[in-house]
Amino acid sequence: QKGFRRRIVVAGNHDLGMDPNLDDIPFEEIVRQRGPRSSTSASNTEAKQEDRKKTSAQKMRALLTNCEYLEGQEVNVDGIRVFGAPWTRAIAMSGVFQVPGAFNRN
């Protein structure tokens, strides 16, 4: 933590492994809505093995040992209130941290 007293992390709408609503869903199912994968340097075998992996928000969060992870929480940093929340309204295809009907101004 050289140079920083605190590190604050907030997941975003592309952080598949952090959304507990997607736990135990094969990676390929989560991204299937996006269409065919773009070509990468990985071989087809490696890509298929990657698809079989499942997400686990609890395991991912356990890896964050040198920071504070916020999900709908607030912390005070030197008198400044910092609120972190990953949720977005349901418009993107990935379905990560999306809340249907949220943030509507009706």
Image (cartoon, rainbow, N blue to C red):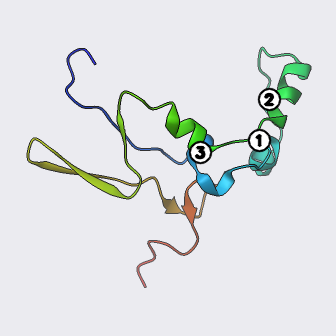
Residue 78 sits in which quadrant?
A: top left
- The residue positioned 44% from the left and 72% from the top of the image is 103
Q: Nearer the viewer, residue 52 or 92?
A: 52
Which is nearer the N-term, disc 3 or disc 2?
Answer: 2
In the rendering, at what x and y percent does residue 70 appear? 37, 48
Say whether residue 14 is visible: no
- The amino acid marked with disc number 1 is Phe
Residue at label 1?
27
- The residue positioned 21% from the left and 23% from the top of the image is 4
Which is nearer the N-term, disc 3 or disc 1?
Answer: 1
What is the tally of numbered marks visible in this picture?
3
Q: Residue furthest right?
A: 45
Dot 3 alpha-carbon crowd within 10 angstroms: few under 14, some 14 to 19, many 20 or more = some
Please name which of the two marks, 3 or 1, marks the residue nearer to the observer.
3
Tags 1 and 2 touching, CB below 8 Å: yes
Dot 2 alpha-carbon crowd within 10 angstroms: few under 14, some 14 to 19, many 20 or more = few
Q: Secondary structure at mark 3?
A: helix
Residue at label 3?
57
Placement of the C terminus among the 4 image quadrants: bottom left
Spatial separation of the CA atoms under disc 3 and disc 2 = 17 Å
- The amino acid marked with disc number 3 is Ala
- The amino acid marked with disc number 2 is Glu
Residue at label 2?
50
Q: Secondary structure at mark 2?
A: helix
Dot 1 alpha-carbon crowd within 10 angstroms: few under 14, some 14 to 19, many 20 or more = some
In the rendering, at what x and y percent does residue 33 appear? 78, 52
Spatial separation of the CA atoms under disc 1 and disc 2 = 7 Å
Spatial separation of the CA atoms under disc 3 and disc 1 = 13 Å
